[in-house]
Image (cartoon, rainbow, N blue to C red):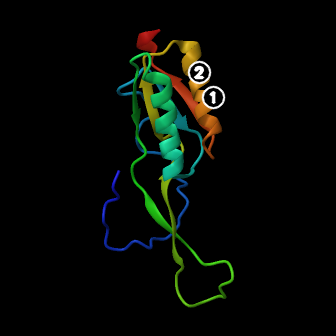
Amino acid sequence: MKKKKIFLRRLLRNKPTQISGVSGSLSLGEYGVISAEPGFLTRNQREAIRKLLARRLKPINGRYWVYINHFVDMTQKSKGARMGKGRGAFSCEKSPIRSGQMLCEFSGLEDKAARELHSSLTKKLPINTSFVYDELYK
C-alpha cells in the first residue's frame, strides 16, 4: 500500500482523544473488532492484523475487511542529539485510532472460532479492543 503524498509531512502528534464519529455497527461482515481506547497503530501492526486474518480465513473461504488506512509520519531526534536545531528525522508512520473506531470485520467463522480470533488479534495490538457481532446471523 503506497503512502499518499501530502504537502506538510511533519504534523503535530496529537493523541486522538475524541470518540469516533463513525458508528461501531457492522457493515460488511458478521463479526468485528472495535477499539476501546484511543491510540496509534503502526504499519507493521496493521500488516500483522491482515496476515492473521488471511491465515485463519483463507482455508475456509472466509472474508475480511481492514479499516486502518490513514497514516501520519512521526519524527524523532537521534539518541545523542541536544535540544534545539529543529524537528527530528522521520522515524515511523502511525495511524491515529479513536475509541469506538471499527478496526476490522470478518465473516465465515463459527462464534467460538471468531472469539478466539479476536483474542489472538488483541495480543498483537497496543490498545484494548471489543468484539462485536451481528444479531442477524445468530
Residue beneath label 1, please? 119
* Callout 2–callout 1 Cβ contact below 8 Å: yes
The image position of residue 29, as x and y in percent, is 39, 23
Secondary structure of residue under mark 1: helix
Residue ID at (31%, 73%)? 7
Residue ID at (52%, 56%)? 16
Distance (Cα) linking label 2 and label 1: 6 Å
Residue ID at (60%, 45%)? 37
**Crowd tier of the residue under label 2, counting other residues whose Cα lies within 10 Å: few below 14, some 14–19, many 20 or above:** some
Q: Amino acid at mark 1?
A: Ser
The image position of residue 106, as x and y in percent, is 44, 25
The image position of residue 51, as x and y in percent, is 48, 36
Residue ID at (56%, 27%)? 131
Residue beneath label 2, please? 115
Looking at the image, which residue sits at the far bottom?
85
The answer to whether residue 97 is seen in the rendering is: no
Relative side of 48 to 127, left or right: left
Q: Amino acid at mark 2?
A: Arg
